[in-house]
Amino acid sequence: MKKDPEGHETELLLVYRHFKSTLQPFKQQSAPSSTLDPIVSKYLGNLTMFL
């Protein structure tokens, strides 16, 4: 993606939309009364690092 950013714009937008949709359940899990799912946390961390 770094070598041809314009060629991967659509792909990046899909990943970003997926990140935003994954972020909502994560925010709901982070409420004080709930426990965080480590799989969701790791996955969201990986998406964040990619973006």
Image: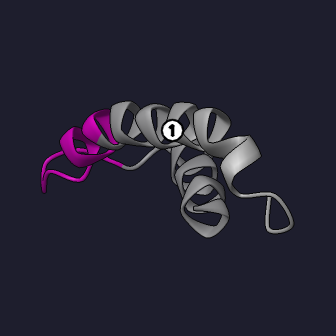
Number of numbered discs visible in the structure rendering: 1
What residue span does the magenta drawing correspond to?
24-35
Task: Give me the residue at 62% from left, 47% from top.
Answer: 43
Give how far across and how far down residue 13 sits, in percent: 51, 38
Q: Examine the rendered structure and indicate whether residue 41 appears above or below residue 20.
A: below
* Left or right: 49 in relation to 29: right
What scheme was used to colour the molecule?
A: one colour
* Left or right: 16 in relation to 32: right
Q: In the displayed image of the protein, which residue is found farthest to the left?
A: 32
Front-lying residue, 35 or 29: 29
Label 1 crowd bin: few (<14), some (14–19), many (20+), radius 10 Å: few
Q: Examine the rendered structure and indicate whether residue 35 appears above or below residue 5.
A: above
Q: Is residue 29 magenta?
A: yes
* Left or right: 28 in relation to 44: left
The kind of residue on which mark 1 rests is Leu
Q: What residue did someone put label 1 on? A: 13
Give how far across and how far down residue 4 sits, in percent: 81, 58
The secondary structure type at the circle numbered 1 is helix
Front-lying residue, 46 or 1: 1
Front-lying residue, 23 or 15: 15
* Left or right: 40 in relation to 20: right
Q: Quadrant of the N terminus?
A: bottom right
Task: Give me the residue at 75% from left, 43% from top.
Answer: 7
Task: Give me the residue at 62% from left, 55% from top.
Answer: 42
Give how far across and how far down residue 35 sits, in percent: 33, 48
Give how far across and how far down residue 19 sits, in percent: 46, 42
Q: Is residue 26 magenta?
A: yes
Query: Splitting the image into 4 quarters, where does residue 26 fall?
Result: top left
Q: Examine the rendered structure and indicate whether residue 20 appears above or below residue 18.
A: below
Q: Quadrant of the C terminus?
A: bottom right
